[in-house]
Amino acid sequence: MEFQPSDNIKAKKSLGQHFLTSVDIARGVVEAGEVKEGDTVLEIGPGKGMLTKELLDTGATVVVIEKDTECIPYLVEAFDKEIAAGKLKVIPGDVRDFDDSLPFETPYKLVANIPYYITGEIIRTFLEREDKPTTISLLVQKEVADRIARSEKESLLSLSVKAFGTPKYVKTVKAGSFFPKPAVDSAILGIYDISGEFFKDLDEKVFFEVLHKAFGEKRKQIGKTLGDLIPEEKLPIDRATRPEDVSLSDWKKIASLIHK
């Protein structure tokens, strides 16, 4: 299923849409998500169904949530047999509105080509949910995937991901694999072994409050940004360290010193 630029459905700039046009990349995203027959998969923003088709070909049951009302009838027509067979469910709406419960049974895997501008929000939202996916496979901006999975410097997002799972930079995806062509390259990002085990003996709310406080002034030294929370002599690392240079394990030690 190749996307044809002459089709009536046009990518909407307001939704940050860039339709995937490469079958090989679509298959790569599905493989990175370790999708197999019998799985339940949530796909966010399927657009014209390039990823959806590859997901269905694995034998998985797929639930798609699509905000673009113009894409809904296209998907319903293109996948009418799969919908009738109960292998595909098409749900109109914004996935960010499903706060309390998802419209399907767990466990599930998350696979998506999401707009760049909501990448961080989507990743954090699904990792922090009580009903977390078991794996995540996303097409994201290359720089974001680099920062999460390959950079020696940490960020609020990279630490959030590593607290819940293991990120992997799977593959670079050239801008020409999308229509319209984005200004930068993308990458397939996989997140594996997702769980809440990291917070078994740690207050999750306190942990993220500490991270937000430190990265809110990320150019400042830890001793200065956290001085009102932890006495300097109790810090387990050098007070002159900047947030991006603090490891996940040290952040856990720091957060463990704060009692609320």
Image (cartoon, grey):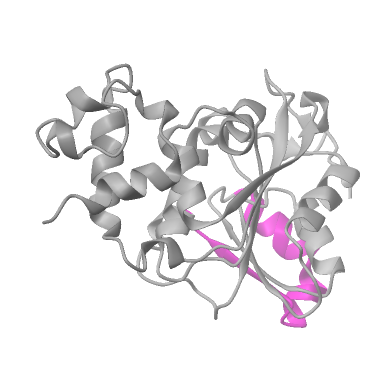
Q: Is residue 81 left or right of residue 166?
A: right
Q: Is residue 81 left or right of residue 239?
A: right
Residue 122's place in the image compared with 192, above or below, is above
Kindly give the residue lying farthest to the front in the view shown: 233
How far across and down, in percent of the image, does residue 209 sit? 24, 44
> Which residue does the image show at 67% across and 58% down from the upper left?
73
Q: Is residue 130 magenta?
A: no
Residue 256 seen in the figure: yes
Count of number-bearing discs: 0
> Which residue does the image show at 84% across and 43% down from the upper left?
25
- Range covered by the magenta-colored residues: 70-94
How far across and down, in percent of the image, does residue 165 sit? 55, 56
- Res 244 quadrant in image: top left
Query: Could you say which is closer to the camera, residue 123 or residue 239?
Result: 239
> Which residue does the image show at 67% across and 18% down from the upper left?
183
- Res 7 quadrant in image: top right
> Which residue does the image show at 26% across and 22% down from the upper left?
217
Residue 196 seen in the figure: no
Q: Is residue 68 left or right of residue 230?
A: right
How far across and down, in percent of the image, does residue 22 sit? 86, 40
The quadrant of the picture occupied by the C terminus is bottom left
Q: Is residue 81 magenta?
A: yes
How far across and down, in percent of the image, does residue 63 sit? 63, 68
